[in-house]
Image: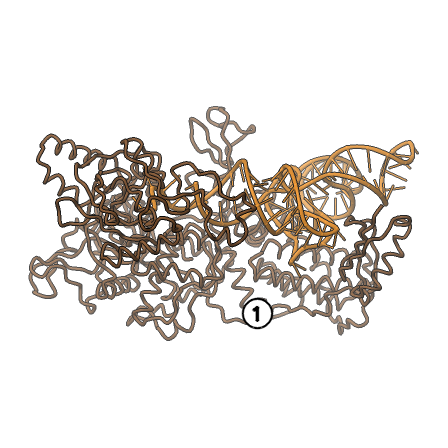
Chain colours: A brown, B orange
Amino acid sequence: MFPYPSGVLHVGHGRNYIIGDAFARYKKMQGFTVLNPMGFDAFGLPAENAAIENQTHPREWTIANIEGMKRQFREWGIVYDWDREIRTCEPEYYKWNQWFFLQFYKRGLAYRADAIANWCPGCQTVLANEQVIDGRCERCDSPVEKRKLTQWFFKITAYAEQLLKDLEKLEHWPERVKKMQYNWIGRSEGVEINFGLEGSQKKLRVFTTRPDTVFGVTFMAIAPEHPLVEEFLAAEKDSQKRAEMGAFVQRVLQQGEIARGAATVEKEGFFTGRYAINPINGEKIPIYIANYVLMEYGTGAIMGVPAHDARDFEFAQKYGLEIRQVIDGSVLPQALRDEGRWESEGGPAAPPPLPYEGEGRLINSGEFTGLTSEEAFRKIGEFLEARGLGCFAVKYKLRDWLISRQRYWGTPIPMIHCERCGIVPVPESELPVKLPDVPFIGKKGLAEIPQFYRTTCPQCKGPAKRDTDTMDTFVDSSWYFLRFISPHDDTRPFDPEAVNRWLPVDQYVGGVEHAILHLLYSRFFTKALRDMGLVNFDEPFARLFTQGVIEHLAYRCPKHNWIHPSEVREGTKCPHCGQELKVDLYKMSKSKRNTISPQDVIDQYGADTERLYTLFMGPPEKDIEWTDEGVRGSFRFLNRVWNLVLSHARKLTDVGELNSMQFTAREKKVWQKLHQTIKSVTEDIEGFHFNTAVSAIMELTNELTDYVTERPKQINKALVKCAFDNLVLLLSPFTPFICEELWRRLGHEDAILEQRWPTYDPQALHAAEREIVIQINGKVRDRMVVPAEISEDRAELERRALAQIQSRVNEKKIVKVIVVPGRLVNVVVKE
RNA sequence: GCCGGGGUGGCGGAAUCGGCAGACGCGACGGACUUAAAAUCCGUUGGAGGCUCAAACCCUCCGUGCGGGUUCGAGUCCCGCCCUCGGCACCA
């Protein structure tokens, strides 16, 4: 994933690039044509905030950071194709954001609407649903407020079903990321039911996933924002009641969505004095306004079934409403009976306590009594549908993507507001609508820059005003991977023919924090572009790998806050006041002062050490602690490799032919280890198990060290030369600098990245002799060494094993013998 | 509450399809080199017990969060729990 140029990189950032680089180098050596580009997600709020602080322009801050990061990439030895670099803050790039916006607008995928939006007071802008984490702003952590505003949206909900269904196609995505998206989209199947309104022709429409409980409805509850609320208020003749109802609604609305959203908030309601009519049985049902009903989901109104819903139960108890059981949970579903589990589970269970939210058999439900929940779901749905009283429906939690931002440093939305013609798109020929090149004026946005927003209407040529919102920066990153294919094309966003050839991305590497935001938006964009005929694939990223974060100890003083580790002396005392520090492991971050600078590591140990340690420290998908001891361990290993190879490199010229047929037993062992290592390193890289790939190379190094030191006079030079060459090749995607140098010293002239990745000889994997474990009753009691030819011979293995352990068995009766060829013989005996 | 990941030495972690638990690395301890230290190199390193004057070697038992089960054999499979991390959460 391409980064936001937020400033100085630390070793935790390095993990993403190092993993990607090792994999790209490996694939390149395997002979693939590898496109490994990099760019910068260069618009965004931090640039504005930094600019305000430093009295500069966001552009200067951004460009300086980009240059710093590119230097860092070079230090790390990351191989990118810089000819394809893209920066989203350049008009050459964001022009196409605007172009896509216009295409979306034409297709109804971009629209402007009134909505209750998430407003971040810290960032002074609205946010998308996905950018609100636990009720707080994803960027600045301020509590998010709700405001009713007119904003631009992308209609991502039009793709809810596809985004959900196509998750199945993503075989090579981590399960947890798919699950997160699955939950986020949040599909539920149910029935919409139109309840009648007493004294009105209107209907009160509710959504329920439990139509089987419709005979248990004893109240209705509507959200305070529900349109009927105003109507009820207006129609209320009793002025005191009207005032009370109004006050209740006001109070709940002011609780704020976040406070109201918490499941722990006590349920409150207000009886409107009005009644609904249950269409299934004509019953008269009181209508309440309730704080726990959300306007954004379903229809903003629910049917209350206290006996079979915990929330409704709580509400009914508080307001003394009838709790009418309509599902008998003591009757096991037919399925259980069919599976024969009826008896084994003890027949009819004791009736579960109310509220009972499970399935069961319907009771007190008119003509539907006796059906199972599952049957009733369908039958009641059909019953209502046939009479025009309701219909089957699917609902999603996914909301449309709010893309308007009231900020300067982003892509201007290419729309013009004309008093006569309304909202008019900027003609495509006039793109890009450039950000005004003015001295940066601070936390104000485009609405403060008349020279930007004063314009003329493209239709009537009269005076008009540009839209002053900019786009969410996630728009920029939703299609950048397509731009890499033809980054300099100024006639179109990308070359569709080439894009269809290169994409989807074969391997994508990024942090799990993008599981919902970026990865969902990019999937939406890809599907929208596919429907526009611009690409011919459904999903942008075929394989996804999400690396874990790197953590480091952080020290916190109750008085002086975060203390840099280098300042901490005398155990864990604060250097300023001597108080005991709180020590904990956290993700590296500037604010906690627990980052490690790659430059410091590189200055002391070299980039290869950082790369190797990053890959070796643990499974790359896991969060893991950075330790100085670990870094030194990797450094020591590289020194051992360096010394091993160099102490022999000069003697390894003119080594002659390698003849594996004439190997001694010792040489065969080396040969076998070499080929086993090639095999496991190759397989480990394919599976992103870099930690075990490195340990395999360490084992090979240990074996080679032993071999050359055992009998220095008798080493097989051709074998050692071959082993060293391969050792260096295997290590080179991880530690390219040292390997390049060793490669030359081994007498080669071409760059190591141009070499072919080693392949193993299956013949060489097996030793001439194999050790077979002998077990008695499953416990290892002895072992034997047999020639490879007979290690697969069951009868012979059994014969030899029994002969060898005869004395241990003697009196005991042999019940049976289990032979696993090539592995073990297990003798089962009875006393 | 729902969904998902995970619990293995002092630490990070290995362990194909159910087949020698603890690879590799860190740390620790002992030794070599050194006036000394660092660096480097060699050795030991899950626990308990036995054998032994002592050690090596060897042997026995226990041991992968807890309790059951399947199996000749379980870190791995099944059932029931506990803990932990992450996501969602009054979503009808």
Q: Quadrant of residue A267?
A: top left
Instruction: Name the residue type under label 1.
Output: Gln
Position in image of residue A362 (x %, y %): 37, 47
Question: Residue shown at 53%/61% (left/top)?
Answer: A23
Q: How many marks?
A: 1
Instruction: Decide which of A346, A647 is in the foreground and name it.
Output: A346
Instruction: Decide which of A610, A71 is in the foreground and name it.
Output: A610
Q: Can the viewer see residue A194?
A: yes
Left or right side of B55 for A135 = left
Question: Residue shown at 26%/47% (left/top)?
Answer: A296
> Element under label 1?
loop
Instruction: Decide which of A66, A268 is in the foreground and name it.
Output: A268
Left or right side of A98 for A37 = right
Q: Which residue is mark 1?
A: A30
Q: Can the viewer see residue A64?
A: no
Position in image of residue A717 (x %, y %): 77, 66
Question: Residue shown at 42%/73% (left/top)?
Answer: A501
Left or right side of B89 for A793 = right
Position in image of residue A532 (x %, y %): 29, 70
**Mark 1 belongs to chain:** A
Left or right side of A15 for A244 = left
Q: Is residue A704 above or below residue A440?
A: below
Instruction: Decide which of A661, A263 is in the foreground and name it.
Output: A263
**Image quadrant occupied by the N terminus of chain A:** bottom left
Question: Residue shown at 12%/56% (left/top)?
Answer: A465
